[in-house]
Image (spheres, grey):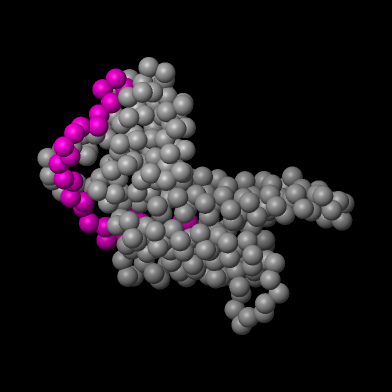
Amino acid sequence: MSALDRLLVDAAVAVSPAAHRTARREQWAADVRDAHELDLSPTALAFGALTTALFHRRAGHRSTWGESMTAPPLDVRPAPHTIRTVPVLVVVALLSLVAAGAWLILQPNYGYESDADRVVGTAGLWTLVFIVPGAATTLAALALRTPIGRRRVGASMIAAATVTGVLAPLTTVTAAFPLPTIPLFLALAGWLVAVRARGWTWSLALVPVLALALDWSGTMYQLLPVRWSPFIVGMPAMSVIVAGVIASRFSTDAPARVEQHPEALVDKSA
């Protein structure tokens, strides 16, 4: 169990009802520790524990983690936690991009800002456009139910795209093509690798190209009212997420084989 996994489990236990903390700590720690035996992501399970604790603090539900891990062998898709982690993280990424437009609206008018305003404004914009969506989609890739090797490669590519997106505005390199297309392509490619997308879905790489072309040509500024124009800043990244969601619907992921576990990990007190 990594330090991040342990931190997530500890946080999940901390927000759980006091009467259930001991049982949940034992169950969740065991589930995360044994995740690799079922080719599941320990981080995904740990994050699932946290979301389950947050959304089911008072619900008298029974955890199904142990049942999914201890049932007789049958072909099913693994269901390691109650709250679906990937959709939550995708929504976080989208909301961050929407918030980037709102952040721009709150900035002082051009020519009236101070040096501090520019620093804070730029840092906030890069955080909302690159860092938060990049971190959320990286974790989402790790939380997928595809083979762990593909998840790690895909997540690494998305993380690299995030770093590239942050550093690209700082470079003075000239190229025959727009440099901002690199992190967009890299992020989408990482997601397609992670979800085991079908071959034809790679044509969805044209979606962010089209979005970036509309942005750079000024077409969107002509189509949208002026008050909505700040939200265009997140449109290319949003197009990557939309293309990734579409590709996920056509994943070639096969059902997983769930083997019998010697000891149930069911929290009966929850």
Quarter-of-image position of residue 48:
top left
Residue 185 location (% of width, % of height): 49, 68
Quarter-of-image position of residue 28:
top left
| On-image quarter of the N terminus | top left
Residue 39 location (% of width, % of height): 27, 51
Residue 270 visible in the displayed image: yes
Magenta stretch: give its range. 241-270
Check the image and report above or below for 206 versus 114.
below
Residue that protrudes farthest toward the bottom in the picture: 176
Check the image and report above or below for 120 versus 61.
below
**Viewed as shown, does residue 50 lie left or right of 147?**
right
Residue 243 visible in the displayed image: no
Nearer to us in this view, 162 or 20: 20
Residue at image position (47%, 53%) is 137
Nearer to us in this view, 40 or 168: 40
**Viewed as shown, does residue 163 lie left or right of 45?**
right
155 in magenta: no
Residue at image position (16%, 45%) is 259
Residue at image position (39%, 40%) is 46
Residue 250 location (% of width, % of height): 31, 59
Residue at image position (34%, 27%) is 24
Q: Main secondary structure of the magenta part?
A: loop
263 in magenta: yes
